[in-house]
Image (spheres, rainbow, N blue to C red):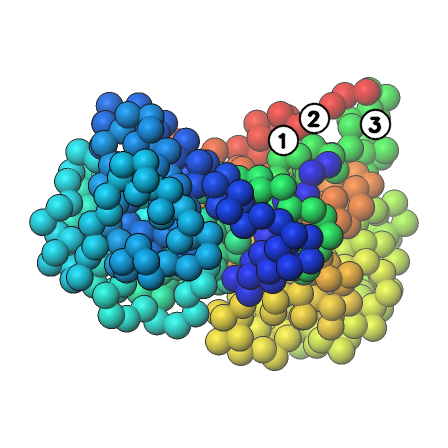
Amino acid sequence: MILYRVTSAEEARLIDRYSMDKEGKDSNKLMEKAGKSVADAAFESCQIHHINRSQLFCGKGNNGGDGAVAARELFLRGISVDVFMMSLPEEYKGSAAWHVQKMIQAGVKPIIIKDAAHLQQYLSPNTVWIDALLGTGLRNTMQGLLKDILDTLCSHHTKQPVIAVDIPSGLDGTNGHPLGPVLKANKTVTMGFYKAGLFLNEGKYLCGEVLLTDLGYSSETLNQASQTYLCTDDVVHHLMMPVRGIDHKYSRGQAVCIGGNRAMPGAIALASLSALRSGAGIVRTLIPQGVAPVLHILAPEILCHSGNKDWLSPEDFSLWTSLKERTRAVLIGPGMGRHKDSATFLRNLIQDLSIPAVVDADALILLTLEEIQKITTPLILTPHEREFLTLTNLSSQELYSDPVKILRKATQAVGHVVHLKGSTSMTGFPDGRVFIHPTGHPGMATAGSGDVLGGIITSFLAQKFSPEAAVLCGAHFHGLAGQKAGEEKGARGIIASDLIHALPEVIKIYEIIE
């Protein structure tokens, strides 16, 4: 299994320094390789779009040096090249200066831009643009000439394919938030390792297709960064367990979904059906009265065990006692509500748990952090942002500034797996690892989507997946199902049940039958 590292902006700088200072990497050769990979992407775009011209916008740092390499390489391949620089060639330093001179020696003369109006007169619609203005080094809100240039590029962009070098200029490499105007890329060629900002928040939609250039960093060099990884197809293929040809419903596992109330039967219904569609042999629900008819209409295969009130109460604990012996995994919380009787029932249940559980929705609000920390059986918490902040008592600004770092810190404090749902979901493990999930679709921002995820993860737990495998595979398939539904319904037309209908088709691609 190949694990692809994801870093913050500061960790990217640490890796670069370590590779050169401790391992003696030749920075000129690294920049040469980086720039050529940008040229490859740009050349391909020229061919696809039948364009023979490229315009490169180069900052004065290493990002601009990568751009100089790309410009020289494209020129030597017969592409007409315009290079726009904000600094004189003699003002560049280090490897960037060396490659700028090589570019000039090859016959490419840069145009020095003094203001945005000067640049505007050169911009051409029938060209490939290469954004090499800024890398991951931007820390504060953009100002001055850089901001003016990016404003001009954004306002004059029509159909030009855009290739970004390492990360679109103006994007925070740690959290994916813009620090000024950002020229949306069709492709981003990122160097050596992925940056978190490529996948988080606005970055997810401003980077286009992300292409990774392997610069040959050693594992020791990459270990200068924290343990943050991308949850890729390869990871999921490695974690998936085969389906045995001799299985029966009990060997496939029994999952119990607990929640619902008379006013909100939908959440537990969606979770239960998604657990069935994800492969659990038997799915039972422990629910208040009045909820079962909704589940039976949705899927007669769901077995219902109903209490005597409109919400779960301590008297319903006996239902759990009758179910737990043959149950391998339990989902707690969807649609449960926050009645004081339900809180008492929940605390009794949690104290009695001896099997893996997914804790979601209202259960995350009813339980305190201290109560969760005391539980010894494996838990997977699946909060969205508001639930996460309530549980951890952290501020939204902390999460905004460095989501990966905050999730890691919180997960280690909680002592259980935490899967933070969002436009880009992330999974944190108590040992300090964080996985970023690149799958998903904007149309998944709809009521019930999180309930579907809870059912999927619980189903995999019931099938004897480890908690790690269950949450990583579950989140991956949840995102793929969203993408599949989006292809058919569009971003506005998706509802949560569409994800369930798409699940079998996306999961079967990964299935092995023994």
How far apart in space, not on screen, are marks 1 and 2 (Cα)?
A: 7 Å
Kindly identify which numbered label has been placed on residue 511. 2
**Secondary structure at numbered mark 1:** helix
Residue 124, position as x, y percentages in the image: 15, 40
**Marks 1 & 2, CB-CB < 8 Å contact:** yes
Mark 1: amino acid = Ile
Residue visible at 40% across and 46% down? 99
Q: Would you name the residue on which mark 3 appears?
A: 248
Left or right of 378 on screen, residue 74: left
* Tags 2 and 3 touching, CB below 8 Å: no
Would residue 310 be seen by someone viewing this image from the given angle?
Answer: no
Write down the quadrant of residue 69 in the picture: top left
State whether residue 136 appears in this view.
Answer: yes
Tags 1 and 3 in contact by the CB under 8 Å rule? no
Image disc number at residue 507: 1
Q: Amino acid at mark 2?
A: Glu
* Local secondary structure at mark 3: loop
Secondary structure under tag 2 reads loop
| Spatial separation of the CA atoms under disc 1 and disc 3 | 19 Å
Count how many numbered circles sit on residues in the image: 3
Q: Residue at point 76% right, 63% down?
A: 430
Image x and y of residue 287, in percent:
68, 56
Instruction: Work out whether residue 154 or residue 410 is closer to the camera in this orientation and state it.
Output: 154
